[in-house]
Amino acid sequence: PGACQSQSVSNDQICNAVEEPSDHIPIDQSALSQNMRGMRRRCLFNEKAGAVNKAAKKTSDRHSANTTTPRCKTNSDKIVPQAAQSSINQASNFPCAVSSSTSEPNIVNEDSSQAIVVANADESGQGSPKKKRHKFDDGDGTSCKRCSCKKSKCLKLYCECFHAGVFCSEPCSCQGCLNKPSNMEIVLSTREQIESRNPLAFAPKVIRTSEPGQELGEYSNKTPASARHKRGCNCKKSSCLKKYCECYQGGVGCSISCRCEGCKNAFGRREGLGPLSIEEAKQGNEENSACVKEEKKEDDNNQLVICPAANPVPAENVLTTPSAMDVRPLASRPPSSSKRPRSTTKVLGHPSRLCNSQAPLKTDTLLSPFENYAEIMFGVGTSDSLKGGLSPQTSVKVVSPNKKRVSPPRIGTGLSPICKSGRKLILKSIPSFPSLGGDVNNADTKTTLPAP
DNA sequence: GAGTTTGAAACT
DNA sequence: CAGTTTCAAACTC
Ligand SMILES: [Zn+2]
Ligand SMILES: [Zn+2]
Ligand SMILES: [Zn+2]
Ligand SMILES: [Zn+2]
Ligand SMILES: [Zn+2]
Ligand SMILES: [Zn+2]
């Protein structure tokens, strides 16, 4: 299976050859400006890329982002370039053979081929009865399915591919797709627009390292059960028991920033018992009495209750045959399921389900955050640079003209950068995204923030 | 596979 | 910032 391409381009790599599908390089949008070092050199892009580069160039630091680990889920260690670290997503690794046919105008992927491809989840591994895995679902990383957007042209966050920072590829069954390397300018400009509205839009939602021991560790430590940013979920009817809930889907418990009602997230509930400290749960008792305990009612206090290994068995598991266990990426598994993950898994980006190796970042995000935040923090200009940087005009109105609004979600409040990198390489740059409300105390890995 | 449910994203 | 609409995935059948 080929690697997937993420939406980014490196200067060096720009080439036009399309090569074999199997071999693509993942292109990461985010990295676009950076060069990925180590990897191979084939590129998909052509001249356009060049243009883009230019734009991107600003970020050209070469930190060398390496996106190693093209394979799904393998990526435990990737070196992350500084900025990247925050935004590391390894999420993308699908078998994507992008048809980068140059000829491809811009349009849809409607090739039936894709659809078909999607279907083939061949390797998913054991033939265990497929319980319910739907498209992206994991499956394991192998199957990596992709989006099936009909109206967004894959240029809005509705599109999981776009949201994850990767180009659409074969497995996608999207219609009118513009999220392709051939439209890179559009893709990037769109990303920037969105990012300008919400700098965290492309930041990984969940970062978790699951090393054998650590998995829970994170809980125990400081990162709240969920190291998620953004605002947490807002589930009303699902009780955070299904994948409708982003927290649950990401394999993390709900945090204080969630506004869910009747939360029963198997990875850790929000609210509820106050006193319970998270950490204990970690291992001390497996039984976890508390977690199960239900929501007593929603008090004001939102605390996070985490259920350690014990029981939280997500619905899926319930029926699942033990033997097969889940194929899901570790990260997404509920704590209890099986044992601890051996490899370090970082879930980033969205659903862990996408299996991509590369970090989908943001175009500039790597740097951009830099810029953005810098600007914001330092009071430099607004985000002009962004806009300017990328040719805005290229932006296409996907569906409707969006006005760009520049009101970052909550930057003001939560500037504290999170710097939790799974592996730590810290660089001097500013973390790609600030932690938002939830985790305030996460300095764990050590953030190196240059003092302003 | 069609149809429903769900909550984020987008929009007003 | 809240309310509404749009959207595509998750889920159900
Ligand atoms: Zn899409
Ligand atoms: Zn797609
Ligand atoms: Zn697409
Ligand atoms: Zn939820
Ligand atoms: Zn939540
Ligand atoms: Zn919840």
Image: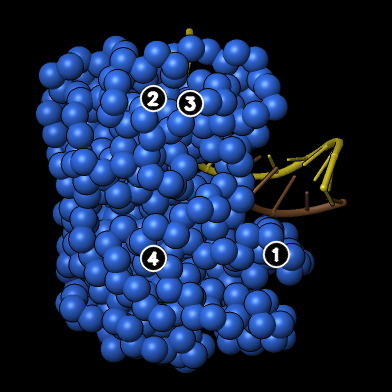
Chain colours: A blue, B brown, C yellow
Chain containing the residue with disc 4? A
Mark 4 to mark 1 CA distance (whole Å): 21 Å
Q: Amino acid at mark 2?
A: Cys
Mark 2 to mark 4 CA distance (whole Å): 27 Å
Dividing the image into 4 quarters, which one contains the C terminus of chain A? bottom right
| Label 3, residues with CA under 10 Å away: few <14, some 14-19, many ≥20 | some
Horizontal arrangement in the rendering, residue A281 relative to residue A329 (left or right): right
Mark 3 to mark 2 CA distance (whole Å): 10 Å
Chain containing the residue with disc 2? A
- Are the residues flagged by discs 4 and 1 from a single subunit? yes
Q: Is residue A330 visible?
A: yes
Q: Quadrant of residue A143?
A: top left
- Are the residues flagged by discs 1 and 3 from a single subunit? yes
Question: Would you name the residue on which mark 4 appears?
Answer: A446
The answer to whether mark 1 and mark 3 are in CB contact below 8 A is no
Between discs 2 and 4, the one toward the N terminus:
2
Question: Would you name the residue on which mark 2 appears?
Answer: A307
Q: Is residue A371 depicted above or below A122 in this figure? A: below
| Label 4, residues with CA under 10 Å away: few <14, some 14-19, many ≥20 | some
Question: Would you name the residue on which mark 1 appears?
Answer: A412
Q: Amino acid at mark 3?
A: Leu
- On the image, the x and y values in percent for residue A451 come to 54, 81
| Label 2, residues with CA under 10 Å away: few <14, some 14-19, many ≥20 | many
Q: Residue at x 49, y 48 (%)?
A: A228
The residue closer to the viewer here, A325 or A173, is: A325
Q: Amino acid at mark 4?
A: Lys
- On the image, the x and y values in percent for residue A146 come to 38, 46
State which mark lies toward you, 3 or 2: 3
Question: Would you name the residue on which mark 3 appears?
Answer: A276
State which mark lies toward you, 4 or 1: 4
Between discs 3 and 2, the one toward the N terminus:
3
